[in-house]
Amino acid sequence: MIEKMKFLSITGPKDDIDRVIDQYLSRYEIQLENALSELKTVPDLRPYLETNPYKAELQKADELLAGFPGGTPEDASVRKLSLEEAVSVIHNLDAKLQKLTKEKEALEKEADIVRTSMDNLIPFTDLNYAVSDILHFKYVKFRFGRMTHEYYQKFMNYVYDTIDTVVHKCQEDAEYVWLVYFVPHSLADKIDAIFASLHFERFFLADEYEGTPTEATHSLEAKLSGIYDRLRDTDRKITEAMKEQRDDLLAASRKLSTYATNFDVRKLAACTNHDTHTFYILCGWMTESDAAAFRKELEHDSSTFCFVEDDHNNIMSKPPTKLKNPKLFKPFEMFIQMYGLPSYDEIDPTIILGLTYSFLFGFMFGDVGQGLCLLIGGFLLYRAKKMNLAAIISCCGFFSTIFGLLFGSVFGFENILEPIWLHPKTAMTKLPFIGNLNTVFVVAIAMGMGIVLMTMILNVINSLRCHDPEKAYFDTNGIAGIIFYGALATVIVLYMSGNLLPATAVLAVMFLLPLLVIFCKEPLTALVEKKAKIMPEEKGMFFVQGFFELFEVLLSYFSNTLSFVRVGAFAVSHAAMMEVVLMLAGAEAGSPNWLIVVLGNLFVCGMEGLIVGIQVLRLEYYELFSRFYKGTGRMFRPYGKTEL
């Protein structure tokens, strides 16, 4: 069902808009519309232009929540804060965290410097000489660095003995050799050039080390350990600060979010002047019950006025759709939303879909055991996860169980229960002109014809609601189509039951007249609507186009009816598949392999259940919805129901 909607215009002094939003609109579901678009006939309207003062604080609160250890604390017990308290919480926590973050960044930078110094110094720990003394040599130059093994060997073999330098080899790895060379001050440039030609990579050590490289490395390690301790202490302070403010931070964020959302209502409001006063105007849709309660509450508010527009022709926007169905059928709204919500004037097909979907599924998947598994499993999954699909599966399982009793099938065994109705595989019906035909096929076609007639009636109701006489009276799915298809169904039933004379009479009277009405639907619609032009100008094209459209109509009636044969076919195939499972399990011998029985039931239940579910949904969308349902509605999106 679709809830009745009322269009409200709310007005009052411009400075009073915050109170109205906080006191009323936050407690009622209202879908706000743009007042400038809705009230085009009202003169001197202008937009409500103000900058949201809560945006900066809300953005800062979101940043703080994003950095919360372990993610946003959604489970926090939120206490109520005033707006001033919320802003104070955000500012104080932000200032504290900024100070701690700056301390952490400084420590991390200091740690990087120490690590770099250690990395430069560690390769030279074999040098048993005080680094600070080397760095203060007066007449001798020194160079710390490294070169590859290839160039080091060339240097030692061909160059070292020919130049005035002393080389001290330190550590090495698979690629490099670290070394220190010393040269007289006067030859430094020449020797540096020779080493550079051998791809010597120089390291610069800071003038801060005491003792040998090994002693200096130990000193740096101790210094780095102290920095790490201070970093951990800073991280602990940040975590503690966040945890201490956990609940207050979330409360402040929600408070600011509510106020920011409330303030943004101004984007949809309009302003107008009257004498020396400025008034705001808000427009939107409320359910009939909410609108009545809202207006009653405003009776004691002298500053706020509310007007209800009952004539939808004076409203620019279309009423939104809010579905309200019994709890049992509410999960089926998922399928409705997949296709498209009904427009406000349409029939809500949720209950019809829920009944036909479950019924057809049960007919195609009739088995007591598997049906109970779907019923119980879907119910438990829905209780645990609140999945709409699980609830739908549970409903389908209920009807599968009923049809399992009618078919006498329990996990594929057909000798445990006597069928209340028939066995799908073996039940046959003798029909005139056709011969023997499986009974479930006959029932499926008859059931399909009944469903098609039902959808035609629904189409007439929808078309009359939308004031569309062509679809209501003269369309394929209108009254003309109902008469033709109903007469055709009556003729078939009469012929099959041996009543040839009445069948012929119905065929002669009711067959051509409805088709002629469908053929002439455009001129007849123009006549009903009292248009000046009844017949189209291109009469030849009209008759040719009408002939082929009529042929397509007859073909669609035939194909749509035969489409329901799949309902009986799946009922038979389900029984046949379970017979194969029992044959593989050796059930005919009297002692079946229960593992194969269980696995086979699981396979059939999973695979065929999925296929049947898709096929039934296809029938719903293409054979039912296509006849009467548009699904062009827009969802009711309320501004809120939030607590400040």
Image: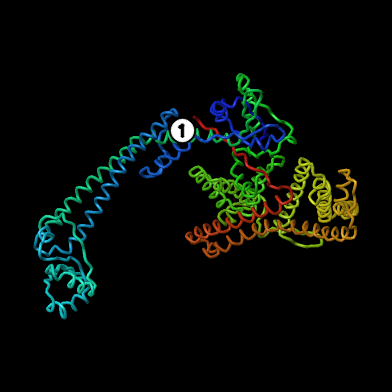
Question: Where the N terminus falls, by quadrant?
Answer: top right
Residue 247 sits above or below residue 493 on the image: above
Closer to the camera, 460 or 635? 635
Residue type pointed to by label 1: Lys
Count of numbered badges drawn on the protein: 1
Residue 320 image point, x, y percent: 65, 39
Q: Please name the residue shown 88% across and 54% down the image.
A: 536
Q: Which residue is mark 1?
A: 255
Secondary structure under the numbered disc 1 in the rendered image: helix
User: What colour scheme has been applied to the protein in the rendered image?
Assistant: rainbow
Residue 434, quarter of the rendered image: bottom right
Q: Residues within 10 Å of mark 1 (few under 14, many from 20)?
A: many
Q: Please name the residue shown 45% across and 38% down the image.
A: 56
Closer to the camera, 457 or 587? 457
Residue 180 sits above or below residue 95 on the image: below
Q: Residue furthest front?
A: 186
Residue 533 image point, x, y percent: 90, 49
Q: Residue furthest bottom?
A: 158
Residue 321 image point, x, y percent: 65, 40
Residue 454 sits above or below residue 423 on the image: above
* 390 on left or right of 85: right
- Can the viewer see residue 174 in this picture? no
* 233 on left or right of 45: left
* 557 on left or right of 578: right
Q: Please name the residue shown 68% across and 47% down the image.
A: 631
- Can the viewer see residue 65 in this picture? yes
Residue 504, quarter of the rendered image: bottom right
Closer to the camera, 343 or 530? 530
Residue 135 image point, x, y percent: 13, 60
Closer to the camera, 152 or 534? 152
